[in-house]
Amino acid sequence: MSIPKPTISPLVVTDLPILAQFLFTSQLSQPTNQFLFSNWPNEAAQIALYTTGMEKSFADPLVEMYKATDTTSGEIVATLILTRSKPPAAPVAAPIAETAAVSNAGTTPPTGVIPAFHAVLKRMLADVQKRMDGVDHFVLSSIFVKPLSRHEGLGSRLVQLCVDKARIAGLPLFLASVPSALGFYQKLGFVETGHAEVDLSTWGPKYGGFGVYRLSGMLKND
């Protein structure tokens, strides 16, 4: 007997705490996270920041948010955020969870965010997005699948949902990929459009094992 696939449906406001927790969890896997927040991991500050940002997203008609729910347990096992970016407005949403703190923070870094490293990530994000300046497009802003639900095709299903929506609208689909997800997106047909880098060894302790971190712009234009 085959196991039923998780169902995909729109997120609702009552799902916000789960979404914020997912964003926090995905952030912790990125080496840049510990340089972005004071008193790291500073869970309270991160959760508060993501909650505020996602509250704004729920009120934004250009943002679509989805969840994948296990049909047996009723548990939310994945989330997805897709944003329409229309010119001349600047990109508004985090291309992926790791940069959520940067995109949602506005001009002034919020409480708990280290200003100097925040500025570095903002420059990186602007660099990888600049090819899309003035172009009407969709942004795959965030995707997260719980570890126990990975390697079952769920992530690919959620990305395909974005691809289909972009294709129907006749628009390109863009995202900014963290290093660990680059191969995943390449297998799904995304092409790298450019990248931005930061040498984390200049921010971390000597001999701490830190190296160059790359954020890659990815485009799918079917």
Image (tube, rainbow, N blue to C red):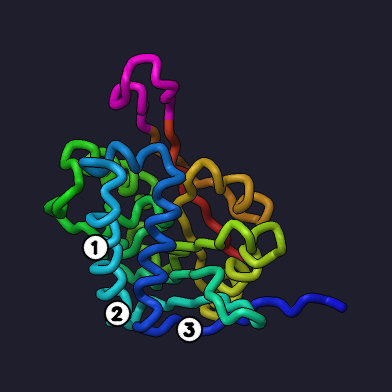
Q: Who is closer to the viewer here, 121 or 221?
A: 121
Q: Which residue is disc 2 drawn over?
A: 60
Q: CA distance from mark 1 to mark 2?
A: 19 Å
Q: Which residue is disc 1 drawn over?
A: 48
Q: Quadrant of residue 123?
A: top left
Can residue 132 be seen here? The reply is no
| Residue range of the region highlighted in magenta in the rendering | 198-212
**Residue 46, x across and y down, in percent:** 28, 55
Residues marked 1 and 3 touching at CB (< 8 Å): no
**Residue 148, x across and y down, in percent:** 63, 60
- Quick check: 159 left or right of 124? right
Residue positioned most to the top? 207
Q: Quadrant of the N terminus?
A: bottom right
User: How many neighbours does mark 2 have within 10 angstroms: few (below 14), some (14-19), or many (20 or more)?
Assistant: few
Of marks 1 and 3, which one's residue comes earlier in the chain? Answer: 3
Q: Which residue is disc 3 drawn over?
A: 10
